[in-house]
Image (tube, rainbow, N blue to C red):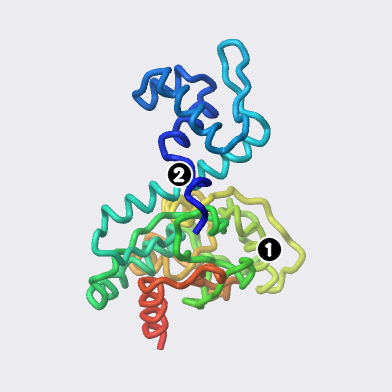
Amino acid sequence: MLARRYLPSIPSLLALEAVDRLGSASAAAEELNLTQGAISRQLQVLEGQLGVTLLIRDKQRLRLTAAATDFVAEARRSLHRLAAASLALRANPTGGALNLAILPAFGMHWLAPRLAKFAGLHPEVTVNLSTRLKPFDFTDSAFDAAIHYGRQDWPGVEYLKLMEEEILAVAAPSFAPLGEAKEVLALPLLQLESRSGDWGRWLAHHGAAGIRPPAMLFDQFATMSQAAVHGMGAALLPLFLIGRDLAEGRLVPLYGSAIRSLGSYYLVWPKDRPRRAPLASFTAWLTSEQG
């Protein structure tokens, strides 16, 4: 543990962070519901404790020194993490919270239906879910783990494979099934922006290599599937997402059977962080579900 003299007080850090963000002691005082004099005293206390000049007084504005700017960026991250820890404690005062980042479509259609079973087996664990579309740095987040689509290409993490993915070319019933794969080029195409090569790969799989057609881009499968249902064009969508739409006739296959996606779905968690009991329970349960 660091010596206590190196640990600034929370009020001093809040004052410095607010001044950095808002540019003046008066604005910081208004936000923190303090007097301007109280803000000034907190900043003086912090400078005295650290033995470093943090602020440049320029007429009516306060500017942080270059070193203080780096310091407050780290302090801001620490304050966010402390606030998140406090919220987690309030939400689950007996402990056992698992903070999980999920992909929206996979989380809703694959994970969510299974979570009730996990909750029944592990009532001591509270699972908190937030959506993230892309990999992120675990060191700057409060997440214990994340659902990742792709290959094993996220640095510094451990992997548990959850599911391979198959995609099918589909459209609304107003689009007739195709006689050959290349006929899809005459249709408006829908595509996930993070998978810009899917239509080209689908065409190559069906014998029409070397074509990379333009398409309307979407950032989430849920939005793209609804666009396909409402007749905006043809889409390559995962089978786990469109089972009901196919069964109830809102979407129909256009050509061929489903093909394997390039990536799979994984649970990932940081290598360099001790695995807490809630995450250990969760990974063990997911492993048993696949067995």
At x 60%, y 30%, the residue is 54
20 horizontally vs 65: left or right? left
Residue 174, x across and y down, in percent: 45, 55
Which tag is nearer the camera, tag 1 or tag 2?
A: 2
Residue 26, x across and y down, in percent: 45, 17
Tell me the residue that label 1 is attached to: 200
Q: Nearer the viewer, residue 154 or 8?
A: 8
Q: Are marks 1 and 2 in contact (CB under 8 Å)?
A: no
What secondary structure is marked by label 2? helix
Name above or below for residue 69 compared with residue 215.
Answer: above
Residue 53, x across and y down, in percent: 62, 29
Q: Earlier in the sequence, mark 1 or mark 2?
A: 2
Residue 145, x across and y down, in percent: 46, 65
Residue type, label 2 = Leu
Name above or below for residue 285 compared with residue 276.
Answer: below
Name above or below for residue 45 compared with residue 86.
Answer: above
Q: Quadrant of residue 276?
A: bottom left
Tell me the residue that label 2 is attached to: 79
Query: Which quadrant is home to the C terminus?
Result: bottom left
Q: Nearer the viewer, residue 167 or 47?
A: 47
At x 45%, y 64%, the residue is 144
